[in-house]
C-alpha cells in the first residue's frame, strides 16, 4: 500500500533523459508551482509569479537561457503535482514538496536539492486559548490530502494520545476558508505554509502558530529520474545561490566581483577560470546570469520569506550556528 500522498507509480516518460535538450529546443522552462502560497509562489495583480519557489524557476531559466523570463508557470495542487512531473507536463517541480524515500523511489522522481528545511506545525485562532498542540484532544483539524501532513498528523496523534476529527479538503484556498470560517479548530501543514496563511489574514495576530514541530520536512526541487544532466543543472543552481551568499556575491555587485575579486573559487563560480559552466552544458557566465536575475539565496529569502515572518533558522548558511544550508565546492 502506498504512503498517503503517493499516486500510483508510473514509469518516467522516454523524454526524461532529454529534458535539458527539450527545454533548450522549446526555448522555455515549464515549472510546476503551488496554486498560490504567499511568499513561495503566487501571481500578483498583474499575473506575475512571485515567491521563493518561483524565484527558483527563474534562476534555472537564467542558468539555461541567460533570461529569467523564459518560464511558464503551471499551478499544481498537492494531488496532481507528481503526475504532472511524471507525465512530462512540467519539466521541474518547485512547489513546497517534501523529499521522502517513497517519493524518491516509487514515483520515479529525483530530488535535486533541499531548498528549504521545514517542519509540520499547527495554527489556531488566538481566541481558542490553546497554547500547545497537546491541548487539541477532541479537536477538529483541517488537513490537505495527498500530502505528508496527513500521515504525520496520524502518527503524532497516536504517539501523544490526542484524539482528533480530520476535516480533509483538497484545494488550499477552500481549506484555509474552512479554518477561517470555524469549520475546524486547528489547521496543520508545514510551518512555512502556516506563516504564509497567517500573514495573508487581515489581522495576523488573531492566529497563533503553536510551538510544537512534529516532523522533518525538507522541501526540495523535483525532476524525473533518469535525467542526470538536467538534475545537475537544477542542483548546481541551488548550490550557486548558497555559494554566492557565502562569498558575498549579490545581485548588485556580481559584475564587480567577477571583474575584481581575486579569490580562486569566486573566479571559478563567476566563469573567469575553470570553465565549470561548460561541464554543465551551460554558458560559462551562467552563474553571473543567475545572480543578476534573482540574487543569492539570502536575497531570495529576505525578499520573499522574511516579510511574512519566517526566520532563517536551519536555512541559514552552515557558517551560522544551527544553519544547515551548505554547498559542495565549485572546482
Image (cartoon, helix red, strand yellow):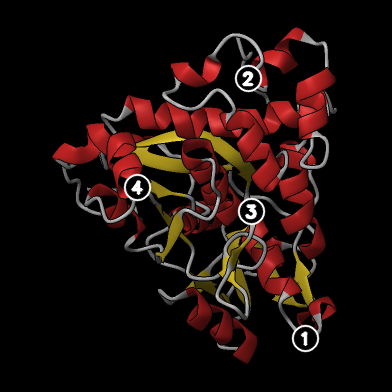
Q: Can residue 60 be seen in this view?
A: yes
Counting other residues with Cα less than 10 Å from the Cα at mark 3, is it few (<14), some (14-19), or many (20 or more)?
Answer: many
Residue on which disc 3 sits: 52
Picture disc at residue 58:
none
Q: Distance between the residues labelled 2 and 4?
A: 26 Å
Q: Mark 2 points at which residue?
A: 271
Sequence-wise, the earlier of marks 1 and 2 is: 1
Query: What residue sits 33% from the left and 35% below the top?
Result: 20
Mark 4, secondary structure of its residue: loop
Q: Dot 2 lies on which element?
A: loop
**Nearer the N terminus, badge 2 or badge 4?**
4
The outermost residue toward the front is 259
Q: Is residue 117 above or below residue 149?
A: above
Judging depth in this view, the residue of 198 and 156 nearest the camera is 198
First in sequence: mark 4 or mark 1? Answer: 4
The residue identified by callout 4 is 91
Looking at marks 3 and 2 on the same chain, the residue that comes earlier in the sequence is marked by 3
Crowding near the residue tagged with mark 4, few <14, some 14–19, many ≥20 C-alpha atoms within 10 Å: many
Q: Where is residue 58 in the image (x, y as percent from the top left)?
A: 55, 50
- Relative to 168, 202 lies left or right: right
Circles 3 and 2, Cβ within 8 Å, touching? The answer is no
Cα separation, mark 3 vs mark 2, equals 25 Å
At mark 3, the secondary structure is helix
Q: Nearer the viewer, mark 3 or mark 1?
A: 3
Viewer-nearest residue: 205 or 137: 205
* Badge 2 vs badge 4, beta-carbon distance below 8 Å: no
Q: Report whether 57 appears left or right of 124.
A: left
Q: Name the quadrant containing residue 297.
A: top right
Q: Which of 95 and 274 is in front in this view?
A: 274
State how far apart marks 3 and 4 are (Cα): 18 Å
Residue ID for mark 1 = 202
As drawn, 281 above or below 308: above
Amino acid at each position: 500500500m502506498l504512503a498517503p500522498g503517493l499516486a500510483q507509480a508510473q514509469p518516467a516518460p522516454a523524454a526524461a533523459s532529454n529534458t535539458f535538450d527539450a527545454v533548450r529546443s522549446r526555448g522555455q522552462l515549464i515549472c510546476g508551482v503551488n496554486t498560490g502560497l504567499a511568499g513561495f509562489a503566487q501571481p500578483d495583480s498583474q499575473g506575475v509569479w512571485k515567491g521563493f519557489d518561483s524565484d527558483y524557476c527563474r534562476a534555472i531559466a537564467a542558468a539555461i537561457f541567460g533570461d529569467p523570463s523564459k518560464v511558464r508557470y503551471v499551478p499544481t495542487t498537492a494531488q496532481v503535482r507528481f503526475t504532472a512531473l511524471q507525465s512530462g507536463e512540467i519539466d521541474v517541480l518547485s512547489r513546497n514538496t517534501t523529499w521522502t524515500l517513497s517519493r524518491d523511489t516509487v514515483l520515479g522522481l529525483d530530488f535535486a536539492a533541499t531548498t528549504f528545511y521545514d517542519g509540520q506545525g499547527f495554527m489556531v485562532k488566538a481566541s481558542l486559548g490553546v497554547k500547545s498542540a497537546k491541548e487539541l484532544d477532541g479537536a477538529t483539524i483541517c488537513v490537505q490530502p495527498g500530502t505528508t501532513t496527513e500521515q504525520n498528523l496520524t502518527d503524532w496523534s497516536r504517539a501523544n494520545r490526542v484524539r482528533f476529527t480530520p476535516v480533509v479538503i483538497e484545494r488550499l484556498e477552500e481549506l484555509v476558508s474552512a479554518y477561517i470560517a470555524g469549520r475546524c479548530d486547528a489547521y496543520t501543514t508545514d510551518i512555512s505554509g502556516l506563516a504564509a496563511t497567517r500573514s495573508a489574514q487581515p489581522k495576523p495576530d488573531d492566529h497563533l502558530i503553536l510551538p510544537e514541530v512534529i516532523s522533518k520536512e525538507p522541501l526540495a526541487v523535483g525532476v524525473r529520474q533518469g535525467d542526470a544532466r538536467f538534475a545537475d543543472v537544477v542542483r548546481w543552481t541551488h548550490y550557486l545561490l548558497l555559494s554566492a551568499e557565502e562569498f558575498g556575491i549579490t545581485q548588485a555587485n556580481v559584475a564587480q566581483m567577477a571583474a575584481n575579486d581575486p579569490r580562486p573559487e569566486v573566479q571559478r563560480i563567476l566563469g573567469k577560470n575553470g570553465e565549470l559552466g561548460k561541464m554543465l552544458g551551460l554558458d560559462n557566465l551562467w552563474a553571473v546570469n543567475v545572480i543578476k536575475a534573482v540574487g543569492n539565496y539570502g536575497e531570495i529569502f529576505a525578499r520573499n520569506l522574511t516579510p511574512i515572518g519566517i526566520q532563517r533558522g536551519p536555512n541559514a548558511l552552515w557558517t551560522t550556528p544551527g544553519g544547515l544550508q551548505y554547498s559542495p565546492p565549485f572546482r
